Amino acid sequence: MKLIGSTTSPFVRKVRVALLEKGLDLPLEALRPTPLTEHPELRALNPVSKVPCLVLADGTPLYDSRVILEYLDELVPEVPLLLTGDARWPDLCLQALADGILEAGVAVFYEFSFRPKDYHWQPWLDAQCAKSYAGLQQLEQVAGDWDEELSVGKLAVVCVLDWLHFRKALDLRSEGPVELSEHFPKLWNWHQRMSLRPSLQQTHPAL
Ligand SMILES: N[C@@H](CCC(=O)N[C@@H](CS)C(=O)NCC(=O)O)C(=O)O
């Protein structure tokens, strides 16, 4: 089994953290796809050419991050990251919200990284940043009550915060830059406590 992905991708990080938590030592095959790069070997596994992609021992590819997390939870049920009972749906929804914040942030990052500057369109950037910002506002309302137990939802939230900080993706909105610790203090404080976890420290986004 191997994982294909980059050390910068927040979606790949979700899987890397889950592997560490579950004590699975898998090689990371480094690949950082962008919407403009062609990677035939990745496309053969995942036609939309995105990472993470987990390749099983028999060659079967699994994607995306949520599917891979489900698979890993079945593989190592002793360390569950998917919650059960009443907590299940709220936590899956938390993961969906965090992933949605990330998708908008990644869209902004791709816009300023790959589209020629003359084609940048501020209303579109603002609209994407507004999605991320609104999501973070919702998280700020509830983060004060959170503990440091890891779940797929909380894992996705940590990955969002570190990635937004790393790429400064929200700084492109016309209202001005966003300092996460100032705009979302409860969320940031929780993130600081959570970040003591070795699996999160070992996978911090890095070029
Ligand atoms: N929903 C997917 C999103 C994966 C994703 O967007 N990955 C980015 C890297 S952060 C990617 O592979 N981008 C390449 C592309 O858009 O072509 C997941 O959860 O795995």
Image (cartoon, rainbow, N blue to C red):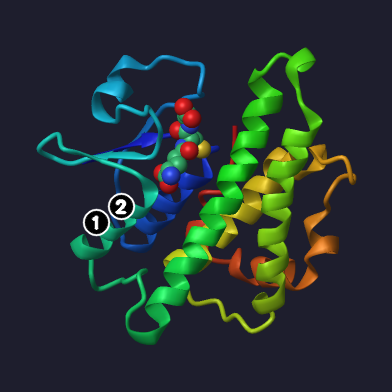
- The front one of 67 and 181 is 67
Q: Marks 1 and 2, Cα distance to the nearest angstrom?
A: 6 Å
Q: Are marks 1 and 2 in contact (CB under 8 Å)?
A: yes
In which quadrant of the rendered view does residue 23 lie? bottom left
Percent position (x, y) of residue 160?
60, 53
- Queried on whether the Cβ of the residue with tag 2 lies below 8 angstroms from ligand 1, the answer reads no
State whether residue 53 is above or below residue 164.
above
| Quadrant, the N terminus | top left
Residue bearing mark 2: 67
Which residue has dot 1 on it?
71
Q: Secondary structure at mark 1?
A: helix
Where does the image place residue 102, in percent across and percent down from the top left? 58, 48
Give how far across and how far down residue 99 sits, in percent.
Answer: 52, 53
Q: Is mark 1 within 8 Å of ligand 1?
A: no
Identified by mark 1, the residue type is Tyr
Residue 30 image-quadrant placement = top left
**In the rendered structure, which amino acid carries the disc numbered 2?**
Val
